[in-house]
Amino acid sequence: MGIDGCLAGPRSAAALSAPGPSGSADLLPGPPGHPRPLQPLRAALVVVVAVVVGVFVLARTGSAPTTAATHVPPTTVRTTTVPVTTVGRSTVVTTSTTTTTAPTVTLPPAKVTVLVLNGWTVRHAALFFQHKLAGDGYDTLAPTNATTETNKHSEIFVVSPGDSPNALSIAAFLGLPSSAVMTPTPANDSAVAATLLHQADLVLVVGSDISNQVPSGYNA
């Protein structure tokens, strides 16, 4: 009986650990590595969390599709401002007009013939201005007297309209206003003898306004 008792001990331990027909051994902890009933659910949750994290990381680090930039050239806007003046309840629009004068052609002085007439009481005034114009290059005729010597304002008569630019140049050279240049008419050319009027391109009648330029006692 002693031997039988020794053998019965181990068998009883094995019998206790062996699964029975009712499967009650599943409720006891199993050996290391044996999955427990909740482990498949935990594994599934881990996979889901990993997928969510991966999608989040990809969304943060990924780059959105880009569209090629389009260069729009700068636009220049030209604005015209019209001054507006308001008077009471009525509005007055003020506009300005710019007149452009076509360039005029001035001939070289050597191609312009000038006749100088003394129309004031200063002696040798015509001679003085004839020398002055000749010194500036103009083709001058021998000076003579006007039909009258009471001309307060000097006049430059333009025989041909094309010589007006040259007459204006002479007026500026002598210090005369542009109004001194005129076309001869029966109302304004009484100081010029008819026989002298068409002998030159321009006829200068020396008046009182520039006679003071003649030096005292001049007789060159």
Image (cartoon, rainbow, N blue to C red):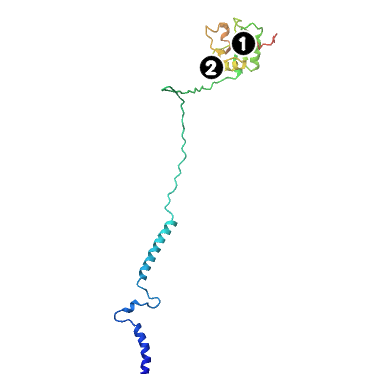
- Residue at the outermost bottom position: 1
Left or right? Give the position of 56 relative to 157: left
Q: Label 1 crowding class (10 Å Cα cut-off): few <14, some 14-19, many 20+?
A: some
Disc ID at residue 55? none
Quadrant occupied by the N terminus? bottom left
Q: Amino acid at mark 1?
A: Asp
Q: Horizontal and vertical percent for residue 59?
A: 42, 57
Q: Horizontal and vertical percent for residue 68?
A: 44, 48
Report which residue position mark 1 lands on: 209
61 or 10: which is nearer to us?
10
Q: Amino acid at mark 2?
A: Gly
Estimate the spatial distance between the alpha carbons at disc 1 and disc 2, rounded to whole Å: 26 Å
Q: Horizontal and vertical percent for residue 140?
A: 62, 13
Q: Label 2 crowding class (10 Å Cα cut-off): few <14, some 14-19, many 20+?
A: some
- Residue at the outermost left position: 22
Report which residue position mark 2 lands on: 162
Quadrant occupied by the C terminus? top right
Mark 1 or mark 2, whichever is nearer to me: 1
For label 1, the SS is helix
220 or 149: which is nearer to us?
149
Q: Earlier in the sequence, mark 1 or mark 2?
A: 2
For image coordinates 34% across by 76% down, the residue present is 27
- Check the image and report above or below for 156 versus 54: above
CB under 8 Å between discs 1 and 2: no
The image quadrant of residue 142 is: top right
The image quadrant of residue 6 is: bottom left
